[in-house]
Image: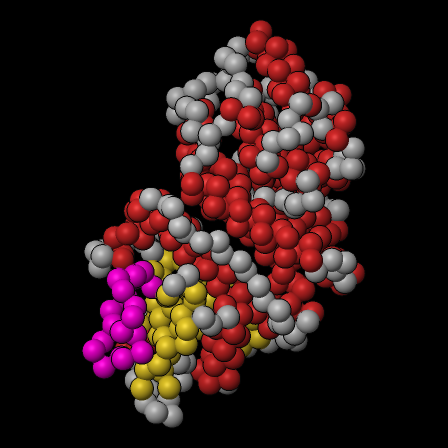
Amino acid sequence: MDLPSPSEISLDQVTQELIRDATELARQVNERRPLQNEVIGSIQKKLLGERVYNSNAIEGNTLTLRETRSVLQTGEIVDVGRKREATEALNLERAIAEVQEMVEDPESWPDFARFIAVHRTLLSGVKSHAAGVIRSEGIILTGARHQPPDPTKLDALLQQFFSELRNASDTEPICLATWVHWSIARIHPFLDGNGRMARLWQDLILFGHQLTAAVIRQQDRNEYYSALEAADDGNFDSLTQLVARSLSKTLQIYVNSQREVDELKDWAVGIVGESNVRLDEKRRLEYLRWVWQMDQLQDAFERCATQVTDASDGTVEVQVHPFEIVDQSTWETLRSGGPAAKTWFYWANFRRGQERIQYCFFFGHHFASPTEPEASNVGPSACLLVSEQKGDEKAVRLSELKDCPVTLRELLVVDDKLARKRLDIAQDSLVYDVDVDPLDVARDFVQEVLLNRMP
């Protein structure tokens, strides 16, 4: 096999639009520089934990995000039975630090010795016999259409890879990072750790071009593997889209964190126009921007939950448990009013003392009543609904609960903006808040539950 040159990769209109979205968001972040030390410290701590947790989880490590952060913070392996997994977390932290030292030195990016050294750190104490060693035996990936190349071809492929990387200074950074990621995964030079190395070198390229890490989440694993397989067949759109979206999500952490310090001021997310995009591509872009809004909403709920829990003396706790977002096919089904199973997006679990109550946020179809004139411009769409469950009782939609003080009824996207349908208790009528801030939605909901539902 031969590797395609990064300059040979062709990307469709949707992918190019998402790259522009990420680039615009990066411009907004850079305009805010220099960021306050408080913001930088918070971001670095959050980003390190998420990078280590997600990259290891994709490979089967069962440590939770909370457990991973605890291991990184203390540097200790408390559970002897999970020593290997904890060591993997600490190793990846050290490997990330080594890669960060290379960011300002582009000559080190295609350096084979540095590449081997990072891998040695990654597998030290886990699979020491394979650490920093190019494999000399064939391996089979179960279920993969394209198998890793024969060991006899690895030297030539690695030489080609580093040569292409050395001469790719003019390639668009997100496209180059995607190509680097795929190339390492496709060459599969080591017995173990190839996926983590691919993601490390991807982020090295992004950081080296004044961007940040593209954290591919473990709940996107199926999409991730499908995108790699599509790239094996020569189609890099899905993988580049995933990298661009993941990069944008990380960039948004910078914006959100700065807003927290500035009391949530100057929210800015730029969306480029859709002119000259074919109908099917427009629908794809519409779905991905819908995903973007839903991701921001989930992130807002997680932030509010963390703030409330951290501020409590232990008697109050709010936890958010995320699930994988529905794919475009299911989204289309929900838009048309068709049935879809297992559409949970996240659970928000509340505890005050011994009292517990949980809310399930799940996707459904938006039905506008004729008595809702404010919703007359809302066409067929997927929406986020909410049900409440106390203990072992049956879950009930908020709209079906009598005299429920929690006012949220639906969340949907209208003209690429988040809209909230809620009950105006004073007027006893339903109203819509269009272009509502996700953080305001999360903050209002958590406040209503804690103060009115479980005082």
Which stretch is magenta? 364-383
Answer with left or right where residue 22 lies relative to residue 333. right
Residue at 65% of width from left, 40% of height from top? 206
The one of 114 and 81 positioned closer to us in this rendering: 114
- Residue 119 visible in the displayed image: yes
Residue at 52% of width from left, 20% of height from top? 4
Answer with left or right where residue 141 lies relative to residue 404. right
Q: Residue furthest front?
A: 276
Q: Residue furthest bottom?
A: 426
Answer with left or right where residue 9 lies relative to residue 373. right
- In which quadrant of the rendered view does residue 188 lie? top right
- Residue 98 visible in the displayed image: no
**Place of residue 443 in the rendered image (x, y in percent of width and height, measured from the top left):** 53, 75
**Place of residue 226 in the rendered image (x, y in percent of width and height, measured from the top left):** 41, 34
Q: Residue furthest top?
A: 152
Answer with left or right where residue 30 lies relative to residue 186. right
- In which quadrant of the rendered view does residue 426 lie? bottom left
The one of 125 and 240 positioned closer to us in this rendering: 240
Residue 373 lies in magenta, yes or no? yes
Residue 118 lies in magenta, yes or no? no
Residue at 62% of width from left, 69% of height from top? 266
The one of 16 and 181 positioned closer to us in this rendering: 16
**Place of residue 15 in the rendered image (x, y in percent of width and height, measured from the top left):** 46, 41
The one of 68 and 366 positioned closer to us in this rendering: 366
Q: Main secondary structure of the magenta part?
A: loop
- Above or below residue 447? Residue 5 is above
